[in-house]
Amino acid sequence: MLILSLKKLGVMTGPLAMIVVGCSLADQELKNIARNYNLIKFAVIKQILLPVLIFFVLRLFCSDDVVWIIVILASMPTAVNLVAFIGERGEDSATAAQAVIVSTLISLPMIPVLLWLMRLF
């Protein structure tokens, strides 16, 4: 009974985290997100430059399978639970929610592109 309850609680965490992000973004305008150049720079570095750098460095030391796994993990978007952690500390959870949205939008096309580019090398 306890295990079943914990499993159901675990299944709820994803949707609840997305509700928290949505609530943090409720009063935000899209143009404010698009004008936040620091946020966009962060997302480009995290989603594009870092995985490419990791790919070329780890290729020298690790097997191809390990490199692929680490690059895929490095190219994942910012975790949704970041918004909840920042909100608990009383910090600006709206900016954290914007970071989650921007990194997710960038990762949608970039993960397949990165995988395609990795196959070329």
Image (cartoon, helix red, strand yellow):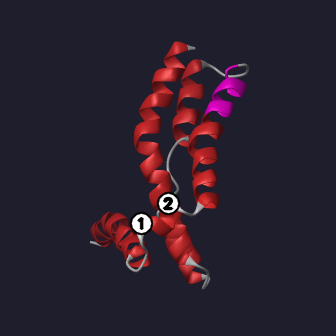
> In percent of the image, x 31 and y 69: which residue is there?
12
> In percent of the image, x 58 and y 79: which residue is there?
92
Quarter of the image that includes the C terminus: top right
43 drawn magenta: no
> In percent of the image, x 63 and y 53: which residue is there?
42
Residue 22 horizontal/vertical position (percent): 37, 72
54 drawn magenta: yes
Q: Nearer the viewer, residue 77 or 106?
A: 106
Q: Nearer the viewer, residue 74 or 103?
A: 103
Does residue 44 sit above or below 1 in this rendering? above
Q: CA distance from mark 1 to mark 2?
A: 6 Å
Does residue 36 sit above or below 42 in this rendering? below
> In percent of the image, x 28 and y 68: which residue is there?
8
Q: In the picture, residue 82 is in which quadrant?
A: bottom right
Other-residue count near label 1 (Cα within 10 Å), few / some / many at <14 / 14–19 / ≥20: few
Residue 4 horizontal/vertical position (percent): 27, 67
Residue type beneath disc 1: Leu
Residue, disc 2:
34
- SS assignment for the magenta stretch, majority: helix
Quarter of the image that includes the N terminus: bottom left
Q: In the picture, residue 55 is in which quadrant?
A: top right
Other-residue count near label 2 (Cα within 10 Å), few / some / many at <14 / 14–19 / ≥20: few
Which segment did they paint magenta? Answer: 52-59
Residue, disc 1:
30
| Lateral position of residue 62 relative to residue 15, left or right | right
Give yes or no for contact between labels 1 and 2 (Cβ–Cβ under 8 Å): yes
Q: Nearer the viewer, residue 46 or 44?
A: 44
Query: The residue tagged with tag 2: helix, strand or loop?
Result: helix
Residue type beneath disc 2: Ala
Residue 23 horizontal/vertical position (percent): 38, 78
